[in-house]
Image (tube, grey):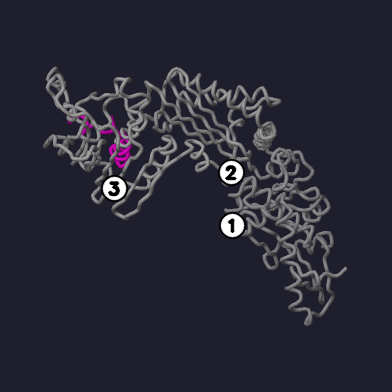
């Protein structure tokens, strides 16, 4: 394909806007449309920032028509020296505007002379009325092309600018245009905190919803609205002016575990932060490193912290046209110094509250250190399991492997070596392995992870099953199932619950896959004429109690069974009773409550579910 000088095209400004809208408004969808609304409202906020007007009206109508009115100075109109109309230049000519002159506009959001033009030229219909000097200048565009411009006298001494537009579906073509009034409310609510004393008066004519936002205390109101429950009475706040830059910072530690920040520059929120945010973070790190004993990561020092910064800068520098990140290098040093001063003042004036913050951060440091030890222990446990798999044979007197390992084999978990010896003679060695537990397994829900993964019983169980913490793979298990085989008494049931807790913590999917089961041992054996019948619960036995003929053997545990009785009752198809423990969210929630550290749920469950009149000494 030929490629030469004639292939180089130059788009006029209107065509560039309408065909490449994402370059100017960030997106060619409803987010781009909201950016249009944002651009016009921020022009009105800029007027209020300069001290002209304290009311901004925003109205939404059917058909995605939106109107924004302020009480500022009004846009200039009339012929310029080059013969072009000023109002037309403001809304249709690239890089035209008064915000390049800091004598006319100071500390405002607009800087490139693009925003309002992007709105005007990307709309199907765009109208602007400018009131000043007893006159009204009116400009109407249709799909970015001027239809009319007029100047007419007005009776009242009115000033301000009114803009009305309908964004073009042809331009914002990635989805159907639907202006979200809730998003507009959020924008105006946030702006009210940054523009103390300015009223944002909103009206949704589609639903007739009306709402006004007005903040008297600025960012303090914002923090009260957006922050969590504070952990200290006095919020931290500072306002600083330096070399023409105004900075306001607020901060408080909350009961949230999350760090939350908001960065604003000249009334716009910078969702990606920037230099002002970097300055605050640096100050926090340097300040608390001197106050706390031991090393703490910067992230830990900001756990539960809510903070917001608003800067007003004569010449703002942003990362892009949508202004999501502020770049001014001078903001870093200013915000760092201001934050340090604010923290020092807080420590001096409110020592009791400051000490609470230090105590909180110290606890977070200890918790993080414990979590790091736990992570290392989990990693070590995983390495040990993987190391044992390479050995193929484990050097443990507690584990007796089945002859054939794999999905069709079952690992029986029994109480102690004595029970293991008894079951070893009764089992089918080809498909049943045995792991003898020493007493009760450690409680996974009430012990720290570090201690849990250091437990020898846990490590042996994981190795016997080839369950690597954090890397569970059902296809790589040494045994396809685990069978809990304990005495049919309170201690046996407690051991079973502890096994459930351990597997639920390490590999919940193992339970979800139906691999954990309970191999029941007979509670009663009835012997009659050389034959034996087995009953596994009191309920089963009581149903036939009156009809029984022969000798009744009540088994206190597995040790009461002969090897032959254990074989017939638990390992023959005729009598074997295996209950698969199925996943149930309610049951596991109850298990977590009853086996956890908090004693209150345990006490409540006991009082609600046990009839103490039935208990005999």
Sequence-wise, the earlier of marks 1 and 2 is: 2
Q: Inspect the magenta stretch and tell me whether residue 580 lies in it.
A: no
Mark 2: secondary structure: loop
User: Who's the residue at 77% across and 41% down the image?
Assistant: 396
User: Which quarter of the rendering shows the C terminus?
Assistant: bottom right
> Disc 1 marks which residue?
585
Q: Are marks 1 and 3 in contact (CB under 8 Å)?
A: no
| Numbered range of the magenta stretch | 14-39
Mark 3: secondary structure: strand
Quick one: label 3, few (<14), some, or many (20+) residues within 10 Å?
A: many
Q: Inspect the magenta stretch and tell me whether residue 35 lies in it.
A: yes
Q: Nearer the viewer, mark 1 or mark 3?
A: 3
Quick one: label 1, few (<14), some, or many (20+) residues within 10 Å?
A: few
Label 1 and label 2: CA atoms lie apart by 31 Å
Pick whichever, 586 or 543, lies toward us.
Answer: 586
Label 2 and label 3: CA atoms lie apart by 35 Å
Mark 1: secondary structure: helix
Give the quarter of the image for residue 347.
top right
Residue 333 in view of the camera:
yes
User: Who's the residue at 26% across and 43% down the image?
Assistant: 67
> Disc 2 marks which residue?
229
Q: Is residue 79 left or right of residue 178?
A: left
Quick one: label 2, few (<14), some, or many (20+) residues within 10 Å?
A: few
Sequence-wise, the earlier of marks 2 and 3 is: 3
State whether the magenta stretch is mostly helix, strand or loop.
helix
Sequence-wise, the earlier of marks 1 and 3 is: 3
Q: Position of residue 476 (x, y in %)?
A: 59, 43
Label 1 and label 3: CA atoms lie apart by 46 Å
Q: Is residue 171 above or below residue 274?
A: below
Q: Position of residue 298 (x, y in %)?
A: 59, 27
> Disc 3 marks which residue?
60
């Amino acid at each position: 394909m030929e490629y030469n000088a004639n292939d180089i095209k130059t788009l006029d400004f209107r065509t560039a806007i309408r065909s490449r809208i994402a370059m100017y408004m960030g997106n060619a969808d409803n987010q781009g449309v909201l950016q249009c609304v944002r651009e016009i409202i921020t022009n009105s906020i800029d007027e209020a920032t300069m001290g002209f007007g304290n009311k901004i009206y925003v109205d939404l109508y059917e058909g995605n028509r939106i109107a924004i009115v302020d009480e500022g100075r009004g846009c200039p109109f009339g012929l310029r020296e080059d013969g072009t109309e000023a109002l037309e230049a403001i809304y249709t000519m690239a890089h035209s505007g008064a915000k390049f002159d800091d004598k006319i506009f100071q500390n405002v959001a607009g800087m490139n002379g693009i925003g309002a033009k992007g709105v005007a030229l990307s709309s199907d219909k765009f109208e602007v009325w400018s009131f000043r000097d007893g006159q009204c200048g009116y400009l109407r565009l249709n799909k970015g092309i001027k239809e009319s411009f007029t100047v007419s006298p007005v009776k009242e001494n009115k000033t301000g600018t009114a803009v009305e537009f309908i964004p073009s579906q042809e331009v914002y073509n990635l989805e159907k245009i639907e202006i979200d009034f809730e998003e507009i409310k959020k924008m105006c609510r946030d702006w009210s905190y940054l523009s103390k004393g300015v009223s944002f008066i909103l009206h949704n004519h589609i639903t007739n919803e009306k709402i006004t936002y007005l903040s008297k205390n600025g960012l303090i109101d914002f923090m009260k609205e957006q922050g969590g429950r504070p952990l200290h009475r006095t919020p931290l706040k500072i306002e600083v002016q330096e070399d023409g830059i105004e900075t306001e910072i607020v901060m408080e530690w909350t009961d949230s575990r999350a760090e939350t920040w908001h960065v604003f520059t000249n009334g716009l929120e910078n969702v990606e932060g920037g230099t002002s945010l970097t300055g605050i973070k640096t100050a926090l790190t340097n300040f608390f490193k001197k106050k706390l004993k031991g090393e703490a990561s910067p992230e830990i020092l900001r756990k539960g912290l809510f903070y917001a910064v608003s800067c007003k800068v004569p010449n703002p520098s942003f990362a892009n046209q949508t202004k999501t990140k502020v770049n001014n290098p001078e903001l870093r040093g200013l915000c760092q110094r201001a934050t340090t001063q604010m923290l020092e003042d807080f420590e001096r004036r409110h020592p009791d509250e400051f000490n609470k913050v230090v105590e909180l951060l110290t606890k977070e440091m200890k918790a993080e250190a414990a979590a790091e030890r736990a992570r290392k222990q989990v990693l070590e446990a995983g390495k040990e399991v993987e190391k044992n798999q390479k050995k193929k044979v484990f050097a443990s007197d507690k584990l007796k492997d089945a002859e054939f390992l794999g999905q069709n084999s079952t690992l029986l978990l029994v109480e102690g070596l004595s029970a293991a010896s008894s079951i070893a003679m009764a089992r089918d060695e080809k498909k049943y392995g045995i792991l003898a537990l020493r007493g009760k397994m450690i409680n996974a829900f009430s012990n720290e992870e570090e201690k849990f993964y250091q437990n020898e019983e846990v490590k042996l169980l994981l190795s016997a099953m080839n369950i690597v913490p954090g890397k569970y793979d059902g296809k790589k298990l040494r045994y396809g199932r685990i069978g809990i085989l304990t005495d049919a008494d309170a201690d046996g049931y407690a051991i079973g619950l502890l096994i459930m807790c351990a597997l639920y913590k390490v590999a919940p999917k193992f339970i979800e896959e139906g691999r954990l089961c309970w191999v029941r041992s007979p509670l009663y054996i009835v012997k009659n004429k050389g034959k034996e019948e087995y009953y596994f619960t009191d309920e089963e036995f009581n149903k036939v109690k009156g009809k029984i003929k022969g000798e009744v053997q009540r088994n206190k545990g597995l040790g009461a069974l002969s090897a032959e009785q254990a074989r017939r009752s638990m390992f023959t198809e005729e009598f074997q009773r295996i209950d698969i423990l199925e996943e149930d969210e309610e049951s596991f929630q109850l298990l977590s409550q009853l086996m956890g550290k908090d004693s209150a749920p345990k006490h409540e469950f006991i009082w609600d579910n046990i009839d103490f009149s039935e208990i005999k000494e």
